[in-house]
Amino acid sequence: MQVGIDMGIVSGGAPAKLDIEELLATRLLVQGNSGSGKSHLLRRLLEQSAPWVQQVVIDPEGDFVTLSEKFGHVVVDGERSEAELAGIANRIRKNRVSCVLTLEGLDLEEQMRAAAAFLNGMFDADREYWYPVLVVVDEAQMFAPSVGGDVSEDARKLSLGAMTNLMCRGRKRGLAGVIATQRLAKLAKNVAAEASNFLMGRTFLDIDMARAADLLGMDRRQAEMFRDLKRGNFVALGPALSRRPLPIVIGTVETSARSSSPKLMPLPDAPQDVEDLIFTPDPEEFTRPMVRRAPPAPRPTTDILAELSRSTPAAVPAPQEPRVAQPELSAEEREERLSAVLSEILDDVQSAYRTDSVLYQDFLVRARMRRLPGPPLSLGEFRRRTAIARSGVDMETASSEAWATALSLSSGVSDDLQGVFLLMAKAAISGEPCPSDARIARAYGTHSARRARRLLGYFEEQGLIVVHADFSGKRIVAFPDLQAETAPGSADAPDVGEERLAAE
């Protein structure tokens, strides 16, 4: 059933229609600086579509809780344990109830953990409950930051992984992401790139205007227009909105936020005894309980498992059958067992699409079951060894000076890109054909060939590689620092591992 909801008007006074059914399949990105009318747009979208589709709102400021008064959304307080939030999210999907997850009052890291737990709970629902849901995430740059900030790396990875699942893999599970951000430059590119519909509002920074123009397919000289947009005016593009960039004015809303833009208000007349009024304490101040911040978030499971693996509690031996001590392993034997555990995990073709934290938990459990002595690998060491293993490097290549140089170069890129870089470097050193887009995408943990090409563009911008083609149009990737290049390879060739995954 095709349902077009009214978002406002276009130039000439015609209604601006948004196809909800198309939106569920293609997702939406909204961008606008503070005061551009971004939250007003989201409210209009939610109000107009409320009768037609289940809605879930991730609300960091508690602005959308007023939807419950008119449209019956259940308000879920984010100040709960992660297990509680995951259970509530699962029941939300099962019973097809619209809700608002309010994270007001939590600090940034707690908000990220709560949102991740809730999104993962919806994502992990049983297949029989994969009904269509419009998932609106306001201030998405908080939950999918492009770079690390003041929060822990574990919280950032957890939140970013949940947002990536929503935008990249949520469609098959009925989850349609609508993400809104003040700064495109602060939003993770792999999250923003999955949206096919865009509503771009007023913005002033050159980098944000350039990215907005790129996403809309506009000339960069036209990017200046985003500075001149008025509050509530947006440029729309996408299969659910318009096939060409279309200026629209967002219509009115029926509900209002609890907070609003500040208004000028004259100061009251100052009383004669203003100093006594300010510096004399109220007697109730001494009896009023002190408001304390929320308790810190629970420790990550990976930290707990790592601690458990470091210290094995001493067991009380039975009188007749004393416990036999485990024989000590040599460094070579320990390394052999360690490599075997890593191979078991990475041999599973599904492992390419699981987050590092999930794989690390699996690794710690398997290491304990194998009674692997000594301190476990840290999460950083695990990521490094996983990247090297996924490159498919053989013993002869691994012992070469060129591979040592490649490892040194890879330390200059972020953890999530090292696997892709080493895969390409190994192909260049061995003179193998250039990996296809599908193979590069799997090394990055995605199915998007477009993102694979963007990764090559990023490496080229950093001066790490040079991409060119032979006379037949096949791709070649050269590494200037290695004095090596891949053999020509087809960018559109299928990925053998992906075909094996599809067959299973």
Image: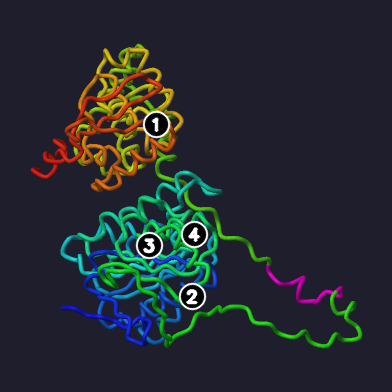
Location of the C terminus by quadrant is: top left
Task: Kindly give the residue lying farthest to the left in the view shown.
Answer: 503
Is residue 313 visible to the viewer in this orientation of the structure? no
Could you tell whether 225 is left or right of 126 in the image? right
Q: Do the residues labelled 4 and 1 touch (CB within 8 Å)?
A: no
Q: Are marks 2 and 4 in contact (CB under 8 Å)?
A: no
Q: What residue type is labelled 4?
A: Arg
Reading the chain from its start, which is encountered first: label 2 or label 3? 2
The span shown in magenta is 279-289
For the residues labelled 1 and 2, the Cα–Cα distance comes to 51 Å
Reading the chain from its start, which is encountered first: label 4 or label 3? 3
Reading the chain from its start, which is encountered first: label 4 or label 1? 4
List x then y, in percent, for residue 179.
38, 64
Question: Height in image: 29 above or below 439?
Answer: below
Q: What element carries label 4?
A: loop
Q: Do the residues labelled 2 and 3 touch (CB within 8 Å)?
A: no
For the residues labelled 2 and 4, the Cα–Cα distance comes to 14 Å
Query: Which residue is disc 4 drawn over?
Result: 183
Q: What residue type is labelled 2?
A: Gly
Q: What element carries label 1?
A: helix
Reading the chain from its start, which is encountered first: label 3 or label 1? 3
Could you tell whether 129 is left or right of 296 in the image? left
Query: Which residue is disc 3 drawn over?
Result: 85
Reading the chain from its start, which is encountered first: label 1 or label 2? 2
Label 2 or label 3, whichever lies nearer to me, is 2
Q: How crowded is mark 4: few (under 14 residues within 10 Å), some or many (20 or more)?
A: many
- Residue at image location 21% in from the left, 41% down from the top: 438
For the residues labelled 3 and 1, the Cα–Cα distance comes to 28 Å
Reading the chain from its start, which is encountered first: label 2 or label 4? 2
Query: Which residue is disc 2 drawn over?
Result: 37
Q: What residue type is labelled 3?
A: Leu
